Amino acid sequence: MVRRRRQRLLDNSVPSPCMGTCRLFDSQPVCKGCYRHQDEIRNWPILTAEQKQAALDAIPERVKALRAEIDNAAN
């Protein structure tokens, strides 16, 4: 009996927000261009559409928190 490897279909329905900057903040492993966590960047090709959308939905709050952190560090 020959076993077939189950091929996982990659989801391309949610586009990557990559800006081509690819630099992480010093304080957190978050990209300065697209504000995704390094795990989200690395795993983007294999995430489901729901996981990708959840990552995108988290970005506005992440931006807000990072900006507050930068402002606090500057004061």
Image: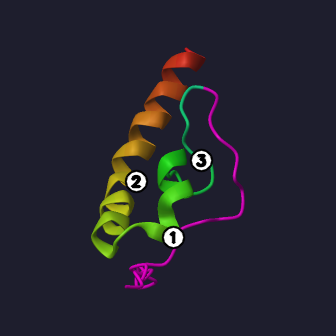
Residue 37 seen in this snapshot:
no
Q: Which residue is mark 2?
A: 59
Q: Secondary structure at mark 3?
A: loop
User: Which residue is located at x 40 percent, y 81 percent?
Assistant: 3
Q: Which residue is mark 1?
A: 45
Residue 69 position, x and y percent, is 47, 26
- The amino acid type, in three-letter code, at marker 3 is Cys
In the rendering, which numbered label is found on residue 31? 3
Instruction: Give the color scheme: rainbow, by chain, secondary structure or one colour.
Output: rainbow
Magenta segment's dominant SS is loop
- The picture quadrant where one finds residue 74 is top right
- The amino acid type, in three-letter code, at marker 1 is Pro
User: Eyeballing the image, is 53 above or below 30?
Assistant: below
- Earlier in the chain: of badge 1 and badge 3, it is 3
User: Which residue is located at x 62 percent, y 35 percent?
Assistant: 25
Q: Is residue 17 magenta?
A: yes
